[in-house]
Amino acid sequence: MEKKTDFKALSGKAKVQYIWDYYRLHILVVILVAAFVISLIHHYATYRDPLLNVIMINVNDSMSADAGGFDEFLEAGGYDLKENPISLNASLNFPENQEYTMTYNDYQVLTMMVAAGGQDLFFGTGEVFLDYAEEGALIDLRTVLSEETLAKYEDCLVYSTENGETEPYPCAVWLSDNEWIQKYNYYDTCYFGIFYQSEKQDVSGEFAEFLLNY
């Protein structure tokens, strides 16, 4: 019969080695659980609900696009940059026409994001953006923009009838020479609108005025 190790008789180094040899799995599990709990606590302690959730499709460079361009709006509006972050998804890309086959996964992701709600601002180019606009995914801009701003973009408005169920209303704007989108290299030209499911239409309207009068 194997003689039981006298733990008390071991040297300090040998005790450490003994514990590691026999209890390493337990130790690793405890470390992993502790790391997960600490990470979870840190996440909830530092998490801030985004002031706006933004979707940009077909940006100039999806690898480098970030929400930094929105800091200018936050500062102009008197918002605390740390307490009022902007959430930006700029990773989705689609062809300019309706041939979605090669980007089916991106199309699914966009559909789920829009259907789930919680999104506020929508930028993009091509038929995918226009499909969402014309099918009623965007609000009537007359509800958030001043008459002066609407008049300024009268010839650049995109209208929706929600597939013929309503009278035409302006739901998006074609930005053909907007300094803000070009300054931060989001686009050269693009469409802009606000999702009708946005729960922050007041702030979305503030940004729209900022953008269109930049």
Image (cartoon, grey):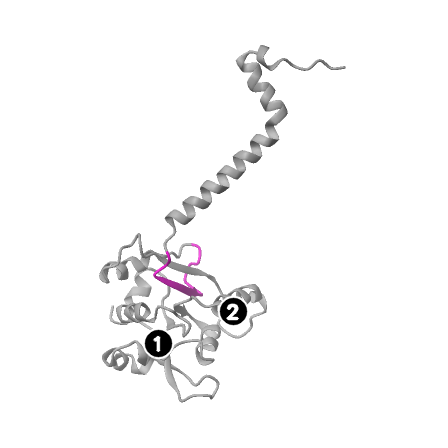
Q: Which one is nearer the viewer's eye here, 61 or 17? A: 17
Instruction: Give the overall secondary structure of the magenta segment.
Output: loop
Residue 61: % across, % down:
42, 59
Task: Report which residue position mark 2 lands on.
Answer: 111
Residue 178: % across, % down:
30, 69
Earlier residue among tags 1 and 2? 2
Tell me the element at label 2.
Answer: helix
Q: Are marks 1 and 2 in contact (CB under 8 Å)?
A: no
Instruction: Decide: is 40 above or below 67.
Output: above
Task: Report which residue position mark 1 lands on.
Answer: 173
| Residue positioned 32% across, 64% down in the render | 182
For the N terminus, the image quarter is top right
> In the image, what residue type sits under mark 1?
Val
- Does the magenta-highlighted stretch encompass residue 175? no
Q: Which one is nearer the viewer's eye here, 205 or 70? A: 205
Residue 189: % across, % down:
36, 70
Instruction: Decide: is 168 above or below 114.
Output: below
| Residue positioned 29% across, 64% down in the render | 180
User: Depth-wise, is mark 1 or mark 2 nearer the camera?
Assistant: 2
Looking at the rendering, the stretch of residues picked out in magenta corresponds to 49-63
**The quadrant where residue 17 appears:** top right
Tell me the element at label 1.
Answer: strand
> In the image, what residue type sits under mark 2?
Thr
Residue 136: % across, % down:
44, 79
Question: In whole angstroms, how far apart are the C-alphas of marks 1 and 2?
Answer: 21 Å
| Residue positioned 46% across, 75% down in the render | 132
**The quadrant where residue 123 appears:** bottom left
Instruction: Decide: is 206 above or below 5.
Output: below
For the C terminus, the image quarter is bottom left
